[in-house]
Amino acid sequence: MMKKVYLQEWILKIDAEKTKEYYDSITVEEGCGCDYCRNYIKNCKTFSKEVMDFYTMLGIDPEKEGEFMEFEANAGKHLYMGFYHLIGEIVKRPNNGADKWDNANIIKIGNVKFTFTDKLDLVPDNLPKPVMQLEFEVMLPWIL
Ligand SMILES: [Zn+2]
């Protein structure tokens, strides 16, 4: 069932149960198996409770699907950016018309920055509609 969610100034309509069903139906192994992705997935096990609560609230399993991209290494930390799909739609964005990474649009939880968009990339065929995208940016250590 679609439910209205208020996150800072964001208003979303999401179906967390259906999103969770989708993530439950796929495996980590179906994703990319390169070292960068494996390092990201291993880091997921160390995410704080508040970060995991955020993913759980949306129905997303951060170890699965989506796209994880490593950008640069700095003082032993690696910048990861990526996204996850979820079932829902954006009702209101804080700074309409501004870039998704505009300060007003960013939700910061622990060391992770999140934003939402309806400009979608690489949507899996079997994902029920409507689809929106959660994007993240985080610095993580190399723990492989
Ligand atoms: Zn990869």
Image (cartoon, rainbow, N blue to C red):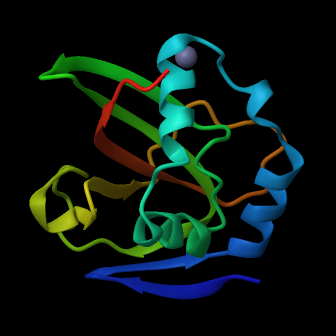
* Farthest residue, direction top: 34
Up the image or down, 55 lies above or below 121; here it is below
Residue occupying the point 13% across, 21% down:
74
Question: Quarter-wise, where is residue 71 in the image?
Answer: top left
Q: Given the current orientation, which residue lies at the most extreme front position?
A: 143
Rendered location of residue 121, percent (x, y):
53, 34
27 lies left or right of 52? right
Residue 98 versus residue 1 in the image, above or below: above
Which residue in the rendered view is the most extreme toward the right? 25
Q: Report how many numbered discs are placed on residues in the image.
A: 0
Residue 73 position in % (x across, y down): 21, 18
Q: Is residue 98 left or right of residue 13?
A: left
Point 54% across, 68% down: residue: 89
Residue beneath the point at 34% across and 31% down: 80
Residue 28 falls left or right of residue 53: right
Q: Quadrant of ligand 1?
A: top right
| Viewer-nearest residue: 92 or 44 | 44
Is residue 83 or residue 41 the one in the foreground?
Answer: 41
Q: How far from the left and from the top, in percent, is residue 137?
A: 30, 43
Residue, x 62% and y 57% (percent of image)? 86
Position of 10 compared to 111: left or right?
A: right
Percent position (x, y) of residue 105?
Answer: 22, 64
Figure quadrant of the N terminus? bottom right
Q: In the picture, residue 69 is in which quadrant? A: top left
